[in-house]
Amino acid sequence: MIKKLRKCNIVKSVLFPIFATLLLFVILKSAEAGDPTGITTNTEDSKGIKSSLNLAWILLCAFLVFNMQAGFSFLGAGFLQRKNTLNYLTMTYMDFCVGSFIYWAFGFALMFGGSFLASGLDKGNSFIGFSGFFLMGNAHDFYTLAIWLYQVMFACATCTIVAGAVAERFKLHAHLLYSVLLCGILYPIYGHWVWGGGWLANLPIG
């Protein structure tokens, strides 16, 4: 009986957000302002729907990855001594606060500069990117911001994984310095080699 109730709760927790998202999309689509010129074509409508669905999907995936932070916090806290739990939870919280700021400032630019994935990411080479700093200029675009939001979740989750590995061994200030190093330099540069069109992705093997 308990297992059936748990399965029912899991189904509700999964299906309800999906249904609510679809309902919200239908409501917003019906409330969309009309074209003042009156020359909207079906092609433009289909492009708008495609870009809206892509954006909604990226945001949904980013929110799901963000929930990993809570999962890591509960997992780590369950394995630690009670006296060290607060220190670990502070680490996981500050990982996201510090990591997201550093990744916004220059980590994202180092990782995806030169990848041409979105607007403002056109300068970089096979080793490092150098466009999109502070998401300013041409990088201040809604699609570029959506990609940043999605990628910053993984950068901060990487820091939190390390927080679990060094729990009860690191002091808070030492871990914060490591978070700056990881989100600002290590993760972005290696990510550029693999996902940003760098040399490692272009090897003739693998």
Image (spheres, rainbow, N blue to C red):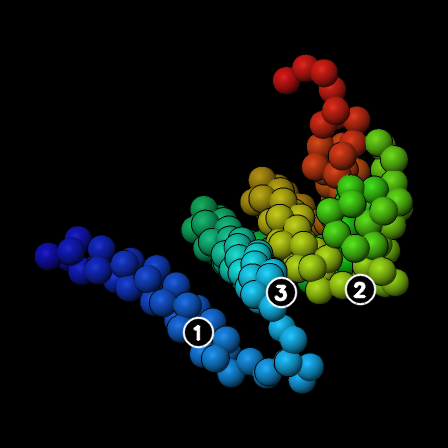
Cα separation, mark 1 vs mark 3, equals 18 Å
The reply to whether discs 1 and 3 touch (Cβ–Cβ < 8 Å) is no
In the image, which is nearer the foreground, mark 2 or mark 3? 3
Q: Which residue is mark 1?
A: 26
User: Label 2 to label 3, Cα distance in Å?
Assistant: 23 Å
Q: Residue, x 18% and y 60% (percent of image)?
A: 5
Q: Quadrant of residue 188?
A: top right
Specify the quadrant that holds the C terminus. Answer: top right
Q: CA distance from mark 2 to mark 1?
A: 28 Å
Q: Residue beneath label 2, please?
A: 140
Report crowding for label 1: few under 14, some 14 to 19, many 20 or more residues within 10 A (C-alpha).
Answer: few
- Where 164 falls versus 24 (above or below)? above
Mark nearest the camera among 2 and 1 is 1
The quadrant where residue 94 appears:
bottom right
Give amino acid for label 2.
His
**Residue 66 falls left or right of residue 173:** left
> Image quadrant for the N terminus?
bottom left
- Determine the secondary structure under disc 3: helix
Tag 2: Cα neighbours inside 10 Å, few (<14), some, or many (≥20)? Answer: some
* Amino acid type, callout 1: Val
**Residue 59 in view of the camera:** no
Residue 15, given in percent of the width and then of the height, sits at 32, 62
Indicate the amino acid at tag 3: Glu
- The residue to which callout 3 is attached is 44
Outermost residue to the left:
1
Residue 162 in view in this figure: yes
> In the rendered structure, which disc, 2 or 3, sits on the residue that comes first in sequence?
3
Could you say whether the residue bearing mark 2 is in a helix, strand or loop? loop
